[in-house]
Amino acid sequence: MALYRDEAIVLRTQKLGEADRIVTLLTRRRGRVRAVAKGVRKTTSRLGARVEPFMHVDVQLYEGRSLDIVTQAETLGPYGSAIAADYGRYTAGTAMLETTERLSETEGEPAVQLFLLLAGGLRTLAEGSHDPGLVLDSFILRALSVAGWAPSFTDCARCGATGPHRAFAVAMGGSMCPQCRPAGAAAPHLHTLQLLAALLTGDWAVADASEDRRRREASGLTAAYLQWHLERQVRSLRLVER
Ligand SMILES: [Zn+2]
């Protein structure tokens, strides 16, 4: 049994017994890790406030047979209170943590890029410098790209024909030229596609200047794109387990 140290973001906590918690962490080097934090629900616990959702911590763990044990945690990014204090930030942040957990299905598999995206996203959310919904959608699009599912918002996702194109098909990977467009493809506004492209590349000047109705349309397409890929991922994992 060995002691190790890593940077981590707390994704989730669950009660365990009288005073302990099981914490789900996304660590920088070991990917997703579930560990026990002992005594953290006692009011005297200094560790307790540090291993709460949204917190970015430097953590020391002891390798256990089934679950590791948190022995120390130092705060690197105290995002918990700034995010929890605002409803819009809280719901966006919660969706970011859930998406991260779904995209890091295999425990112990390194996910450095996802870790860096999440740390940056939570910091932006806590600072309150951009609309929380935009921060969430930008995170989702970039996290899906890191997972190998980068959508296209300009050129045709199937044949590469230069865009912008009118049609958009979630199941085909994004924008569709007139030759490739499947029946029933969506036809989002050109400004919505420009907003989505800005969120994917982190062009905040364009994203911040967008209209509310374009944000709503972009958010709907982002959610549909995420859902489509998560359903397929879960299905492929079930096949692997058989
Ligand atoms: Zn095409």
Image (cartoon, helix red, strand yellow):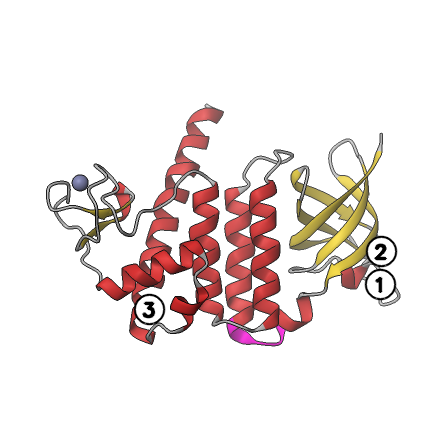
The residue lying furthest to the top in this view is 242
Quadrant of picture, ligand 1? top left
Q: Which residue is mark 3?
A: 216
- Residues under labels 2 and 1: Cα distance? 6 Å
Residue 159 drawn above or below residue 131? above
Question: Which element is circle 3 on?
Answer: helix
Circle 3: residue type: Arg
Circle 2: residue type: Gly
The residue lying furthest to the right in this view is 44
Question: Which element is circle 1 on?
Answer: loop
Upstream in sequence: badge 3 or badge 1: 1
Q: Which residue is mark 2?
A: 39
Q: Return the x and y of residue 195 as percentages of the image width and height.
A: 34, 63
Q: Which residue is mark 1?
A: 42
Q: Are marks 2 and 1 in contact (CB under 8 Å)?
A: yes
Of residues 43 and 115, the one nearer the viewer is: 115
Q: Return the x and y of residue 41 as percentages of the image width and height.
A: 80, 61
| Number of the front mark, 2 or 3 | 3
Q: Return the x and y of residue 231 as percentages of the image width and height.
A: 38, 42
| Number of the front mark, 3 or 1 | 3
- Residues under labels 2 and 3: Cα distance? 43 Å
Numbered marks: total? 3
Upstream in sequence: badge 2 or badge 3: 2
Residue at coordinates 77% horizontally, 39% vertically from top-left?
68
- The range drawn in magenta is 84-88
Give yes or no for residue 214 being in the magenta stretch.
no
